[in-house]
Amino acid sequence: MTNMDQMTDAPDNTAATTGGPAAPAGNAEAAPAPPTVSPHPYATQRAALLAEREALGQARRDTLLYLDGVTKSFDGFKAINNLSLVIQKGEMRAIIGPNGAGKTTMMDIITGKTRPDEGEVYFAGDVDLTKQDEAAIANMGIGRKFQKPTVFESHTVADNIRMSMAGSRSIFAALLHRDSAGERQTVADILETTRLTAKAGTLAADLSHGQKQWLEIGMLLAQDPELLLVDEPVAGMTDAETEETARLLREIARTRSVVVVEHDMHFVRALDVKVTCLHEGSVLSEGTLDHVSADPRVVEVYLGR
């Protein structure tokens, strides 16, 4: 046999396919797996914290109004104490509670009148209200109605609505402004919503107390807010006006979020919404009115008085 024949008959240890790996030698050991390195405990904790923050951030972004851990003290007295409250888009919520429970201070914080000492207050998911002033917050779409109605009594009902739509114009410029067809329709729609169509040309001074409350709600609607904060809207109203106000607010809540602070339990029941009871600056109970009313703590500090 020639050398060439020996070379031809020698076994071929290369792979059968071009570029494949060489077959392992008979007793060759496989390469050891790379060592597993455990992450540093700090890195694990930080990753968990970031994941938790992201989850909380996503939950906040799905809300219209988000308060978490809010605290506010006045001369050592905690008017708001670790308050957490979430209002969804399109939700109406009733807030009840005894005097001094923190209801007014809570609304002051939401509207920028008061700064919290601690906690988060967000609007529309990502707007930090603690860094905004009252005017900026109002322009963002948060309207507030105080318990006592504030209207321009020497002007007609329609003019009150029109002046509220004026934006940066002065009162006199608003009165001289020639309304567009769209603006006239908006005024007409608001008058209908607030049951004041028949009073459009009436001076605001000549309205009943309940009608003045409706007019002020209409003035807020003229600013097209996403969130309305309404403080004791039926105080001083007749029974008929109270029932009509409940229907009015339910209609408004079809297109906006509404927070109603109220003591009249018959009116709250007519609203038929989720109820939050505040006490000493924090949430004492929350749920349906029946659930909250049956809570022994609520009975003790509020309803039983």
Image (tube, helix red, strand yellow):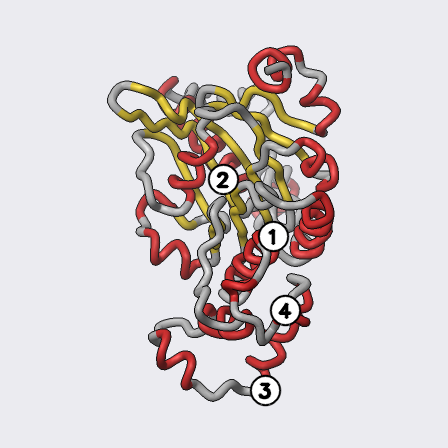
The amino acid type found where label 4 is placed reads Leu
Residue 25 in sight here: yes
The local secondary structure at tag 3 comes to helix
First reached walking from the N terminus: tag 4 or tag 1? 4
Q: Determine contact: label 4, label 1, CB under 8 Å.
A: no
First reached walking from the N terminus: tag 3 or tag 2? 2
First reached walking from the N terminus: tag 3 or tag 4? 3
The local secondary structure at tag 4 comes to helix
Mark nearest the camera among 4 and 2 is 4
Mark nearest the camera among 1 and 3 is 1
The outermost residue toward the front is 206
Write the residue at 46% across / 68% down: 164
Q: Residues within 10 Å of mark 4 (few under 14, many from 20)?
A: many
Residue toward you, 27 or 293? 293
User: Which disc, if any, is residue 191?
Assistant: 4
According to the picture, the residue beneath numbered tag 1 turns out to be 210
First reached walking from the N terminus: tag 4 or tag 2? 2
Marks 4 and 1, how far apart at CA: 14 Å
The amino acid type found where label 3 is placed reads Ala
| Quadrant of the image occupied by residue 262 | top right
Marks 3 and 2, how far apart at CA: 37 Å
Residue toward you, 210 or 166? 210
The amino acid type found where label 2 is placed reads Tyr
User: Compared with residue 49, is residue 19 higher up or lower down, i.e. above or below?
Assistant: below
Q: Residues within 10 Å of mark 3 (few under 14, many from 20)?
A: few
Q: Quadrant of the N terminus?
A: top right
Marks 1 and 2, how far apart at CA: 31 Å
User: Which disc, if any, is residue 181?
Assistant: 3
